Amino acid sequence: PRAPFGPALLARVAAPLSPAHAPCCYGGSNTPSHHPKPLCSLPSLRTWTKEAAASCQRMKESWSAFDTFEHHFRPLVVIELAKDTKEETKEWLTQRIVDKKKNGGAQLLVKPLVKEDGGKIDGNQNVYLVGASHIRLLLGAETVGLVKECNDNSMRTFTYSSRNTFKDFAEDNHDFLTMAERQYIIKHELENLRAKDERMIPGYAQAKLYPGKSIMRRLMTSGILLQIFPLHDTEELKKLRYTWYGQVKISYQPLDQIRCYFGETIALYFGFLEYFTFALVPMALIGIPYYVFAWEDYDKYVMFASFNLLWSTVILEVWKRCCAIMTYRWGTLLMKRQFEEPRPGFHGVLGINPVTGKEEPVYSSIKRQIRIYLVSLPFVCLCLYFSLYVMMIYFELETWALDFHEENESYFSKLMLFLPSIIYAIVIEMMNRVYRYAAEFLTSWENHRLESSHQNHLILKVLVFNFLNCFASLFYIAFVLFDMKLLRQSLATLLITSQILNQFVEALLPYWLQKRHNKKAKKRVYSIKVDTDLSLFEQVNLEKEMGTYLGTFDDYLELFLQFGYVSLFSCVYPLAAVFAVLNNITEMYSDALKICRVFKRPFSQPTANIGVWQLAFETMSIISVVTNCALIGLSPQVNALFPDSKTDLILIVVLAEHILLALKFVMAFVIPDKPRDIQIKLARLEFESLEALKQQQIKFAAESLKEETHGEKKMN
Amino acid sequence: PRAPFGPALLARVAAPLSPAHAPCCYGGSNTPSHHPKPLCSLPSLRTWTKEAAASCQRMKESWSAFDTFEHHFRPLVVIELAKDTKEETKEWLTQRIVDKKKNGGAQLLVKPLVKEDGGKIDGNQNVYLVGASHIRLLLGAETVGLVKECNDNSMRTFTYSSRNTFKDFAEDNHDFLTMAERQYIIKHELENLRAKDERMIPGYAQAKLYPGKSIMRRLMTSGILLQIFPLHDTEELKKLRYTWYGQVKISYQPLDQIRCYFGETIALYFGFLEYFTFALVPMALIGIPYYVFAWEDYDKYVMFASFNLLWSTVILEVWKRCCAIMTYRWGTLLMKRQFEEPRPGFHGVLGINPVTGKEEPVYSSIKRQIRIYLVSLPFVCLCLYFSLYVMMIYFELETWALDFHEENESYFSKLMLFLPSIIYAIVIEMMNRVYRYAAEFLTSWENHRLESSHQNHLILKVLVFNFLNCFASLFYIAFVLFDMKLLRQSLATLLITSQILNQFVEALLPYWLQKRHNKKAKKRVYSIKVDTDLSLFEQVNLEKEMGTYLGTFDDYLELFLQFGYVSLFSCVYPLAAVFAVLNNITEMYSDALKICRVFKRPFSQPTANIGVWQLAFETMSIISVVTNCALIGLSPQVNALFPDSKTDLILIVVLAEHILLALKFVMAFVIPDKPRDIQIKLARLEFESLEALKQQQIKFAAESLKEETHGEKKMN
């Protein structure tokens, strides 16, 4: 029913069955040498489909020779190779992609991008569309371990053989897997296309290969593969955009729809953004009267800070529960992280994975530990020290500029006052960029086996540095200069300017990029708004020029720093939460616009939680207990209450801090991470899997017994 | 080969096959009305055993009618009923115990205790021996989910059908299950003997029953069942005692042997005791020069305290790893807690367990939460308050007595000086006892489903109260009275007296109890040391009079309080660790003696870790960071360094405390809880169980497909 491509395309897609169509390179059509078995006596298309489906139902055998062919080719993923890629390489690559699983191929469908009217392509001619047959996708879903809902409403790991027990499954229902899932499967299969006995990429002697090396990764690092990205589904995107931000009415975000289209990681980010905004509302509401009535009493500040601290613990604990509910529904809560395939960039000698018993690259954990603790950790510490050193220089410059201005007051000296801030801002920005590259390089070099662990190490590295860069100056003002007025001023300036800047970049960037695109895609593409009418060729060419979405990292970082501004010094500036709420509301829309319109569609990434960010937010809330208690202790109102004895004041503050910290830990301990019904469902699944293991053991024992008896009989 | 019972017993044990032996009540012998199927045409004993074994191998059916009979009856567990128990009740109970599983029985063997010479029994005649056939025990091992080592050295959940894949398994190897495991299985089966449609215990109208109620529990609460305990294996015990404490040479404790004889909980306690003692040695070694050279410098104290704090974190983290290694070897690490049967005392209406889908008593979790938070928690808080109140009265009495003595110095006033301490000690002891009862009652009333969760709640309740009772006075002296001399004195007195008292009780009690036993068991039993020569009758009578071992609770509590004395105020009294080490070395021997000789043999309890004690020790080590930092801040040497500004001193101390706490958390985070090889083994098992589930789904799908095709064919 869904056919975004014209009939011309359909005809081309059906091409493999007629060998006259040279450009299509399905398995065996133009590289027959690799296909010793002739694909003879193929029945007519219609009969074949029916027969194949029936045969697949009958056969337990799954990587059938038939499933490489399908009459309905839907391009899902685009591969762009360099313009000057050698023919030999292209042939080899496409052959490997379409080759059978048992021959080490990915058994996908691939087809070069051509103009609908058959005209010559001006730009890069080495653009390929990758798709897969329905059966291939279902088998891929089993390989990646997708969890789907069953007919009895329980969530189970999908297997091809048990496909009929799953909800909404039908042999002809091509929407059983969401498009995000289909693209994820193809990405996974492509990334796990590994070298067999090739020593190099054909045509590129310098691009060395060794058994187990990911081919796509090597192509990427050799500069042959320019990019690989999933295609948008214009109709679906239109629908999603309408429900997401096209309507005027206020509503929750369509998280399930986002998840279907963009995958779990992005849906979880928007879920967290929404949850976090709602969670900030009480803080904002309580913060408003402080501004309106200019409350400066210490008891009110203490109340506000205490509420903030406990509230931040509660919201972080409750988020875990909300997250578990969502990801259980999406099936990612049950996806096992331990059995993840090694990440594409992971390298090592081919060995046996001790867990699965399968052959895959193996890298010594001790070596990784040594790299982490003896290289990465000292490097990060050095960077932190350097960052603090730069900050100290900035403060010295500041005092120097002030002195200079006071001594010889002139127009020049007034300008000089701004100089330190400008220099510091530039240096910080430069340091951030350099550090980010270094962190990425180091984390890659640590050679983590799993993508999640790679991400966590990267996030941790960047996080610590960003935290220091953002808050070190505030800490210095608060606890070394003891200047509350300056602190409030700096805090407000930092918070508001960073928010305005972000909004500006996220709202202006789309328009600017769209304009640039409109200019580039001159022919036929008059406006991006009518992209439903674009041909596939135009759509691909438009999308491949779009920027790449670099993941939710920066968005989370923004929220994390915002949380810092709100909670770390909350008793100094209660209005921060109000700004945060206002910012987040527009943030939702600008982020949605950004991901739908500005960037290339990102690959879906299944995830069960926000990972290391949870830890980061929790750590921030613990640090904020310390800072808030210290700030209250420093406030002149509180100091006025203890005119004689500073000691008593400090002791009381420390005591209060310890009680608050203890309370936080007790709360974190008492509030369960998963709601009871999810706990029960998980326990049931575990119970079932254990029972299944027992059943298998029984079967095994019965078989071994049979053999034994058989052997004994023979002996007799 | 092992036959601790004489030939007379063997003859009696083989009795069921000859109906002339009335006292033996195997299924169907004296209560034929409950056994409608006649147990006819039994082949001769020898043929039967062979045939039955063969049939059991052939049949998948497991709860065979045959397995209630075995020629080799080994009594494992003793049940003692009240003297005046009605015949009707005894008959019903024994019938229920021997009855088939499918009829709701336990399908065990039971036999009344009789004198070997056939003489009349003077004491209680209602003592029963419970055993089980080898096959029954193996099936029971599957029911309780025992994990044993396989031939390929992996640990797997035992199933009867896969028995041949397990290491050391042979059909005639009756030592495949350790004696502790066999007794645990029998206890488990007896405890899970639940009422079917009985409304009351026959003969006792007031002892109400309802479907799903544990019969043994009701018999116990009605006073009909006096006790149930496992029998000692005198030969094995002798061997164990020899390797444990019979030799003079210094060696590690035979933890694996202890585990085989007494089960995992007790072995883990001794493992922890040994580990903890070794871990204290460095502290003790560093502490000695402080005493010898009378070091009082603050920098040395700071070093000692810092080392202590970090060391205590390290040892607690490393213990988790050691514990994981041990319990993996014992198989308990893999035993699933979620699927534990409800504990015997658990009551509720019969419902469907949402996890297993099996019928069992169900109790609302919300009701339990309400009971915990609205009744237990306030009660505990009230008790804590009361305890503190009593302590304050004690300190007031102390001052009053001192004043009284100073005012009118006399012999009477001198006596009066001791009065407050004596009264306080008595009151504390009384409070402890009353509180313990109250805590046990409350925890029972909370109606936890799992024994582990019941234990954890009980331990937590008792722990908090004991902590306060032990350390509140020390805290008061340190942080309210600021009297370091008195603190050191009190600490030393408390530590040393409590240790001497404990050693005294644990070393003297055995002798005293043995003497009492020797007096009681006059006939034939001249000395307990020749107990290998005792007849079964004498052995049972001797053991049933022994005291009941109440679990490792008090032993752990002792260690916990010792850890408190060592770490909480370590910088005031560095010698504490030395005393702790010395105490623990003798403690090991006295505890071993206690469990082997003084008490009844305890039932084995599989466990994977020391449970809530880990948390308790960790909490103690966190509290000790705070107290040590505070003590260093209070010390006159440190105060002398900051003569002008107390504020600076406090700030530095607080800063140091925060850094130490942060370091502790980072260390706890960085050190993995399980060694890498155990992690891999666990991951492999999980992977296998998931693969098995997939296989099951495939099978299910294949079957449903077959049915479908069959149905279609029929339709056609």
Image (spheres, coloured by chain):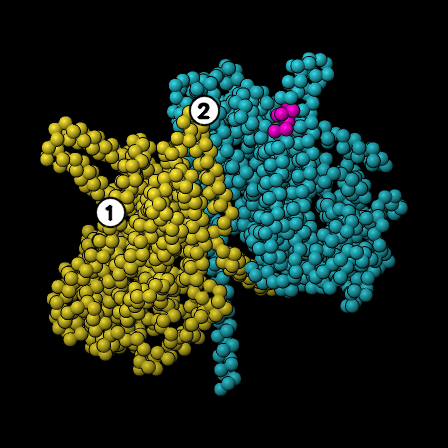
Chain colours: A yellow, B cyan
Say whether residue B393 is magenta: yes
Tell which tag, 1 or 2, sits nearer the viewer. Answer: 1
- Tell me if residue B147 comes above or below residue B556 in the rendering: below
Q: How many numbered circles are shown?
A: 2
Residue positioned most to the bottom: B716
Say whether residue B19 is magenta: no
- Tell me if residue A471 comes above or below residue B128 in the rendering: above
Element class at badge 1: helix
- Badge 1: how crowded within 10 Å, few (<14), some, or many (20+)? few
Do callouts 1 and 2 point to residues on the same chain?
Answer: no
Name the residue located 75 percent from the left edge and 43 percent from the top edge: B4
- Badge 2: how crowded within 10 Å, few (<14), some, or many (20+)? many
Residue position for label 2: B633
Residue B306 image offset from top left, x and y in percent: 45, 27
Looking at the rendering, the stretch of residues picked out in magenta corresponds to B392-398
In the rendered structure, find residue A497 and report the number of the disc placed on it: 1
Residue A253 visible:
yes
Element class at badge 2: helix
Which secondary structure type mostly characterizes the magenta part of the structure?
A: helix
Q: Quadrant of residue A472?
A: top left
Q: Nearer the viewer, residue B531 or B168?
A: B531
Determine whether, in the image, residue B443 is placed left or right of residue A240. Answer: right
- Tell me if residue A361 comes above or below residue A2 in the rendering: above
Three-letter code for the amino acid on which mark 1 is drawn: Thr
* Chain for disc number 2: B
Determine whether, in the image, residue B88 is placed left or right of residue A112. Answer: right
Residue positioned most to the front: A293
Residue B661 image offset from top left, x and y in percent: 43, 34
Q: Nearer the viewer, residue B709 or A711?
A: B709
Residue B523 image offset from top left, x and y in percent: 86, 36
Name the residue located 13 percent from the left edge and 37 percent from the top edge: A415
